[in-house]
Amino acid sequence: MKARFKYRIYPAPGQKARLAKLFGCVRVVWNDSLACCQEKYRLGQKKPTNSELQKLFITQAKKTEDKEWLSEVSVVPLQQSLNDLNQAYQNFFSSTKGQRKARAIKPPKFKTRKSKQTARFTLRGFKVHQDKVYLAKIGKLKVAWSRKLPSEPSSVTVIKDSANRYFLSFVVEIQPETLPKTDNSVGIDLGIKTFATLSNGQKIDAPKPLKKRIKKYRKLSKSLSKKLKDLKDMKKLG
């Protein structure tokens, strides 16, 4: 079973600049490919395959004067960006055909600078060290290891959120936890006054945050009224 483990990272100023360039390149490759797919659809033509998109918007784009700067970042996250676009389209097509039991999936959208920025590396593009993680053409990033990785990660996604914080999100393989067998079972009846009543007779009271807040509001309101009255009296004396 696959799971994600997320950690805060603290890039140096130079690394932040290289990450900004990487996020920009990933965004351009995604957006150019998505625009091409939409244009093909508008013309009634088939969506280009993933390999065709990679050839057009990575391999050949690097040879042009307008997009030669794509060579300044690792090719791995650029390729993964188009893999993700391909998967997004597959999920959308499955959803429109009713092949997905989950909620309806919308078609892929263009990426913007204001949204969360991501770039995904597979094993070819990163290496985990004792206290740092190396990303290709970015360098070794300082990681706040809040917990140990349970196994070797198969991929890592570097993330910059809207609060300008940076994270690494690892995909690892974990063993599902097997709970001990038991013959005991308890029925639960949810209510309004009582949050839950168990079949063994135990009752769990519902939390009442509003009632507590009202009491606090009344107390603060009385305190404010007294202060305003004292302030008026001082003005009269003055």
Image (cartoon, rainbow, N blue to C red):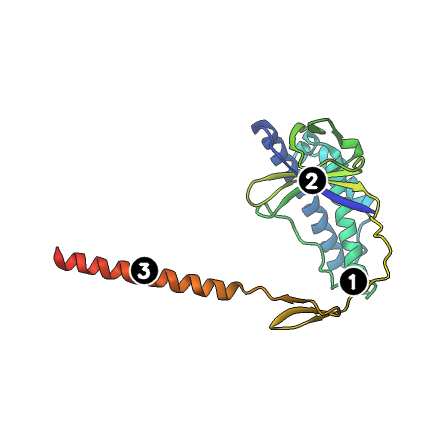
| Residue closer to the observer: 150 or 10 | 150
Question: Quick one: SS at disc 2?
Answer: strand
Q: Give the image location of residue 75, x and y in percent.
A: 74, 34
- Judge by depth and name the residue closer to the eye, 177 or 56: 177
Residue on which the image places disc 2: 119
Residue at 72% across / 26% down in the picture?
Answer: 130
CA–CA distance in space, label 1 to label 2: 26 Å
Look at the image and tell me whether residue 60 can be seen.
Answer: no
N-term-proximal mark, 1 vs 2: 1
Give the residue type at disc 1.
Answer: Ser
Front label number (2 vs 3): 3
Residue wearing tag 3: 224
Residue 36: x and y in percent read 72, 50
Residue 203 vertical placement versus 227 (above, below): below
Amino acid type, residue under disc 2 in the picture = Ala
Kindly indicate the quadrant of the structure image that contains residue 222: bottom left
Q: Quadrant of residue 81?
A: top right
Residue 183 shown left or right of residue 103 in the figure: right
Residue holding disc 1: 95
